[in-house]
Image (cartoon, helix red, strand yellow):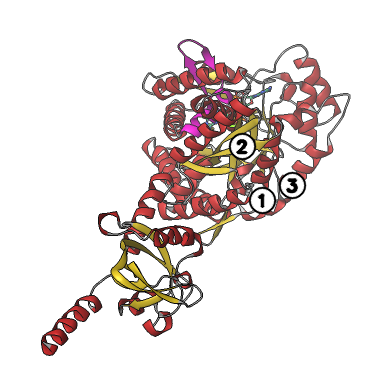
């Protein structure tokens, strides 16, 4: 009998000790009376450390109440507590999740009951202690939490996703409807992100988004929600505003926070954001309306030069519908052959002839008529359609130049405007050179006009491309010179051939006001750096005289000619041949020369001589 008993005990001990679960008993005061060996591998305690200690020692503070309740219940049989989830503390101050599959009271028909004062008495149906089995469910819990997190968060930035954002906005709307108040919704779109992504690759783009998310988060207050909408778009919920204008503070902070450059692949890259703001209840009372209106306001910022913020106003709604329809029309414009190139002659006073022309695009819209580039180039840049447009302009301009050269006008130069964003693309050199070669043009007959802001972005990459163009012999001019952040340093660094004095400075040149110091400075800079100079927007004889006197030889502007269609330009080239206006018969600038010139051009435009075909 003794041997069988011993064998049975061995078996039971073996079963208890080799169980994957934690098996324990506690007495009436909640102290451990037994714990199996699993405690060591699961929580790091030896069983000696725990026997005699209260269960509070290992139950997580936040779950104590739950545990107390379950142990106090003292249920048995099918009424025993099961599936109680608690966190148990490990010895190294961390915790693991457990599910108590069973907490059951151990009773005996009669027994000795020891009360709180240590007095014992013989009682019926005596409580001996509680027996429990707890399973470690930490891995499952982590997996569940990860799945739940992923359902409501963006995987890349770990910010809330749109599902969570919309849910929180819904709550905020309900709150405002019940209790009043003002809630702000922001729509943030990064400027130039696509370019960074295309230039440095998707991995760098992802890294940038993560860093932007971190900086944006710094601009939020507790209670605000910053969410990622997708791509380079973020949304913000500002639930605790006092008045509509409070969102300005957050928007300014974001602008400020993004000012410092981001380091991408070892290079400093500047990123800004366009932010649209809609306010509840003023600008809508539903999630979709608020988001749509914030989006519309954001587009307004994009259209006005990006890097800023705007509050939604109802007027924007009509504009945005027009914009969307115009954007759709723009997509069709190339296929429908709606673009036209106009050419504005550039005249050399010294040579007394047309030396070149600038190609200027027009959109012959089926409903709106002939549209000038300022009304659609920005949109083309934002939508990425600019690539196709640049190719079309380059192709058309080079083909036209080639045709005029074949007719004998062999010294003409063609200037083509290339958007800053285009100039940063890796394939721009190949594309430009492709058009030059296809049309058998000498490379120096093409001049690429870029604006100063190209030079500010990604300087080393741009310098490389400009050098490559120059090495091929293509000329480069800086358009609208003096209107951006003209820096003498970049003129030293960049291989530029020509600077074009912007028309705003030329406009200031009047007979009464005399010569502006800015123009004098620009002409001095061009001379100092040995650069070719063109003045644009020359509308009057006074302006032409003043420029000529200052030593600016090449002139472009309405004084000579407005931009002309290809046919008109050709007629001008042919008719101007041999026709030298009196005002340019003088040998050089001087009082007599100016006098004749003013007399000749009074009340009208100068007629144009041109380099004649042989
Ligand atoms: P821009 O390159 O500075 O071109 C000069 C602009 O000044 C042209 O306007 C021209 O018509 C206008 N202009 C010329 N002479 C005078 C004058 O005497 N007085 C006045 N008030 N204006 C004069 P346009 O054609 O409307 O072009 C505007 C801008 O659009 C251009 O400025 C250029 O930046 C851009 N653009 C034009 N064509 C293209 C193109 O093919 N591609 C790109 N990316 N941009 C283009
Ligand atoms: Mg230009
Ligand atoms: Mg210009």
Q: Residue at x 30, y 70 (%)?
A: 110
Q: Residue at x 49, y 19 (%)?
A: 363
Q: Residue at x 54, y 42 (%)?
A: 190
Q: Is residue 82 above or below residue 24?
A: above
Task: Choose the circle earlier in sequence order: 2 or 1.
Answer: 2
Q: Is residue 12 above or below residue 256?
A: below
Percent of width and height locating residue 78: 25, 55
- Image-based side of 592 in relation to 434, left or right: right
Mark 3 is surrounded, within 10 Å at the Cα level, by few (under 14), some (14 to 19) or many (20 or more) other residues, namely some
CA separation, marks 3 and 2? 54 Å
**Residue 585: which numbered mark, if any?**
none
Task: Choose the circle earlier in sequence order: 3 or 2.
Answer: 2
Residue furthest right in the image: 512
Foreground label between 2 and 1: 2
CA separation, marks 2 and 1? 49 Å
Judged from the image, the secondary structure of the residue bearing numbered disc 3 is helix
Residue toward you, 142 or 550: 142
Residue denoted by label 2: 239
The reply to whether discs 3 and 1 touch (Cβ–Cβ < 8 Å) is yes
Percent of width and height locating residue 592: 84, 25
Residue denoted by label 1: 491
Foreground label between 3 and 2: 2
The span shown in magenta is: 358-383
Tell how many labels. Answer: 3
Residue denoted by label 3: 525
Judged from the image, the secondary structure of the residue bearing numbered disc 1 is helix
Quadrant of residue 561 within the rendered picture: top right
Percent of width and height locating residue 24: 33, 73
């Amino acid at each position: 009998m003794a041997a069988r008993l011993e064998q049975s005990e061995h078996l039971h001990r073996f079963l208890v000790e080799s169980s994957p679960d934690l098996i324990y008993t506690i007495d009436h005061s909640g102290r451990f009376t037994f714990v199996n060996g699993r405690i060591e591998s699961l929580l790091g305690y030896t069983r000696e450390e725990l026997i005699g200690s209260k269960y509070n020692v290992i139950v997580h503070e936040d779950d104590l109440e739950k545990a107390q309740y379950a142990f106090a219940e003292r249920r048995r049989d099918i009424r025993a507590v099961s599936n109680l989830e608690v966190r148990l503390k490990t010895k190294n101050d961390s915790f693991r999740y457990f599910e108590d599959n069973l907490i059951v009271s151990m009773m005996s028909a009669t027994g000795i009951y020891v009360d709180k004062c240590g007095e014992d008495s013989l009682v019926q149906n005596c409580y001996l202690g509680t027996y429990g089995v707890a399973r470690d469910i930490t891995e499952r819990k982590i997996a569940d939490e990860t799945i739940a997190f992923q359902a409501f968060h963006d995987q890349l930035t770990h910010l809330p996703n749109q599902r969570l954002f919309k849910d929180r906005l819904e709550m905020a709307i309900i709150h405002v409807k019940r209790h009043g108040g003002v809630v702000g919704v922001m729509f943030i779109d990064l400027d130039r992100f696509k370019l960074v992504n295309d230039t440095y690759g998707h991995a760098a783009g992802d890294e940038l988004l993560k860093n932007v998310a971190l900086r944006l988060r710094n601009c939020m207050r507790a209670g605000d929600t910053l969410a990622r909408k997708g791509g380079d778009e973020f949304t913000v919920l500002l639930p605790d505003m006092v008045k509509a204008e409070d969102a300005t503070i957050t928007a300014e902070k974001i602008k400020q926070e993004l000012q410092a450059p981001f380091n991408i692949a070892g290079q400093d890259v500047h990123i800004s954001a366009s932010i649209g703001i809609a306010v509840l209840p003023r600008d809508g009372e539903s999630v979709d309306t608020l988001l749509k209106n914030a989006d519309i306001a954001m587009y307004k910022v994009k259209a006005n030069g990006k890097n800023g913020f705007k509050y939604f106003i109802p007027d924007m709604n009509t504009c945005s519908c027009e914009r969307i329809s115009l954007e759709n029309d723009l997509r069709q414009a190339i296929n429908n052959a709606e673009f036209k190139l106009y050419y504005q002659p550039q005249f050399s006073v010294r040579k007394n002839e047309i030396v070149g022309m600038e190609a200027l695009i027009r959109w012959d819209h089926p409903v709106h008529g002939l549209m000038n580039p300022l009304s659609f180039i920005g949109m083309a840049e934002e939508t990425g359609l600019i690539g196709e447009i640049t190719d079309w302009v380059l192709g058309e301009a080079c083909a036209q130049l080639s045709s005029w050269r074949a007719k004998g006008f062999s010294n003409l130069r063609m200037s083509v405007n290339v958007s800053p964003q285009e100039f940063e693309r890796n394939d721009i050199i190949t594309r430009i050179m492709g058009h030059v070669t296809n049309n058998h043009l000498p490379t120096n007959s093409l001049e690429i006009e870029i604006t100063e802001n190209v030079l500010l972005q990604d300087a080393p990459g741009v310098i490389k491309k400009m050098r490559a163009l120059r090495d091929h012999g293509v000329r480069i001019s800086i358009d609208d010179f003096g209107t951006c952040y003209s820096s003498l340093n970049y003129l030293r660094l960049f291989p530029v051939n020509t600077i074009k004095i912007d028309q705003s400075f030329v406009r200031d040149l009047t007979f009464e006001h005399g010569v502006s110091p800015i123009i004098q400075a620009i002409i001095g800079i061009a001379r100092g750096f040995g650069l070719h100079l063109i003045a644009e927007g020359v509308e009057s004889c006074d302006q032409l005289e003043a420029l000529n006197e200052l030593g600016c030889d090449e002139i472009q502007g309405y004084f000579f000619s407005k931009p002309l269609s290809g046919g008109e330009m050709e007629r001008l080239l042919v008719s101007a041949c041999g026709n030298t206006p009196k005002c340019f018969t003088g040998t050089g600038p001087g009082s007599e020369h100016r006098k004749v010139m003013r007399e000749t051009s009074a009340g009208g435009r100068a007629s144009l001589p041109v380099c004649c075909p042989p």
